[in-house]
Image: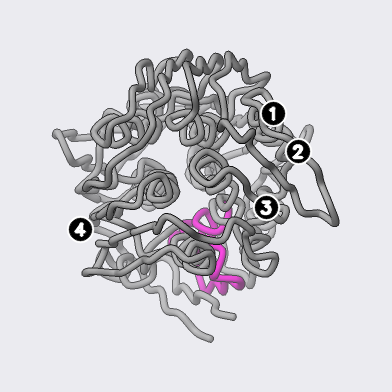
Amino acid sequence: MSKFIIQGGHKISGIIPVSGAKNHALKMFAAGLLSDQPLILDNVPEIEDIFRLTEIMRDIGVDIKQLDHAQYQITTPKKIFTELSARLVPQLRAAILLSGPLLARFGKVTLPHPGGCAIGKRPINLFIDAFQAMGAKYRCVKNKHILIAPTTGLHGTHYVFPVISVTGTETLMLAAVLANGETVIENAAREPEIPALADFLNAAGAKISGAGTSTIHIQGVNQLSGGKAHIIPDRIETLSFIFLGLAAKAKLTITACEPTHVAVPLQILRDSGAKFTVTNDSITVHPWKTLKPLSVITREYPGFPTDGQSPLTVLLTQIPGQNEVIETIYTNRLFYTDVLNRMGANITMHTSQHITIQGGTPLKGKQVESPDLRAGIAMIIAGAIAQGTTEIGNAYQIDRGYENIDTRLQQIGVRISREK
């Protein structure tokens, strides 16, 4: 198991590019199951979640070749296994994305309960309910979820998500493109990764309209082609670097990003007094002397993203006055704040979804553990601005979503190293 060691308090400045979006790349790998023609993806992040999904797909017979750094070719033959590995799937929540394409194209799927990080072990009833609405038969045997489509294939349905679900929306889209008839998805998620997925599917022959809105219409087709796709920039990584720059009071330019995807967080920060220079594909963070305290509520896109909440909280420990965070998406995503308090923060947890932060407190290096992906990057930011040495165990959780984070941060002055 690896750990990161950070010597904090050193000047940070320079340019750091953003990698491809984890949450787009994972869906595009799943889309490769929908055709027997090759799919070529570029700007794929070299992260552990991609490595795990690649292992799962190869295990059922999918041919995946890495053509170059960040470029992959996916070819799914006409016959593959439809039972996903009971050893591999519990390591990756996103494995559930494979269920839609497998069910639609191959007629069945056996899915062990997917795993992930501490906040990733969530029920999958939304997915099961949606597939059943499309005619699939379902049973669960020894923690394996078995779904079988009718002999005539899945049929279109009018499905209303009881809660907004990004992965649920995408998985239903991936199933509906090959279903018979029309599928209407209401209360759909609107994250940028969804229209990006729809753009590729339409280019491959699908008939999808409304992606990026709360209502998506999909007219099923008989088959799809392969093609090429570019993975969009990772908006959560973009935010992570913005918060790092602000927390360190540094001039930091984030390149290869999409500023429109983080418009709401940028405006919230501007309202606090933060200064940015924004181009079509870059954001420069400027040093600050005073910022106003913030009250932030996480929302579905285009609101402030839950995945940006942890690194934001590190910034709030440096803004004098009473700051507030209300987490509306996950009930157990604020427990990492105990670690920040050990480092010198003054955070009060009122409920599992509500904290206040008395900002302006210096942080001190400590030995800590990364409980999940986003809390892990928050600890890296905290370590970078803290006095002394911070050791962050369970680096794997951070590697799940941030490509070569230690090497990249070294380029902007962070004194970070990796040890086994």
Earlier-in-chain disc, 2 versus 4 = 4
Give yes or no for contact between labels 3 and 4 (Cβ–Cβ under 8 Å). Answer: no
From the image, tell me which residue sits under label 1: 132
Question: Does 233 sit left or right of 14 as displayed?
Answer: right
Q: CA distance from mark 1 to mark 2?
A: 7 Å
User: Which residue is pictured at 66% across the width and 27% down the height?
Assistant: 135
* Dot 4 alpha-carbon crowd within 10 angstroms: few under 14, some 14 to 19, many 20 or more: some
Q: CA distance from mark 3 to mark 1?
A: 15 Å
Q: CA distance from mark 3 to mark 4?
A: 45 Å
Which sits in the foreground, 293 or 307? 307
Q: Where residue 345 sits in the image (x, y, percent)?
A: 62, 50
Three-letter amino acid code at the position of disc 1? Gln
Q: Where residue 329 sits in the image (x, y, percent)?
A: 64, 31
From the image, tell me which residue sits under label 4: 14
Residue 111 circle label: 3
* Numbered disc in front, either 3 or 4: 3
Q: CA distance from mark 2 to mark 4?
A: 53 Å
Q: Secondary structure at mark 4?
A: strand
* Dot 2 alpha-carbon crowd within 10 angstroms: few under 14, some 14 to 19, many 20 or more: some
* Numbered disc in front, either 1 or 4: 1
Three-letter amino acid code at the position of disc 2? Tyr
Q: Is residue 386 visible?
A: no
Quarter holding the N terminus? bottom right
Earlier-in-chain disc, 3 versus 2 = 3
User: Which residue is pictured at 39% across the width and 57% down the height?
Assistant: 76
From the image, tell me which residue sits under label 2: 138
Give yes or no for contact between labels 1 and 2 (Cβ–Cβ under 8 Å). Answer: yes
Q: Secondary structure at mark 2?
A: strand
Q: Residue furthest right?
A: 142
User: Which residue is pictured at 44% across the width and 74% down the height?
Assistant: 7
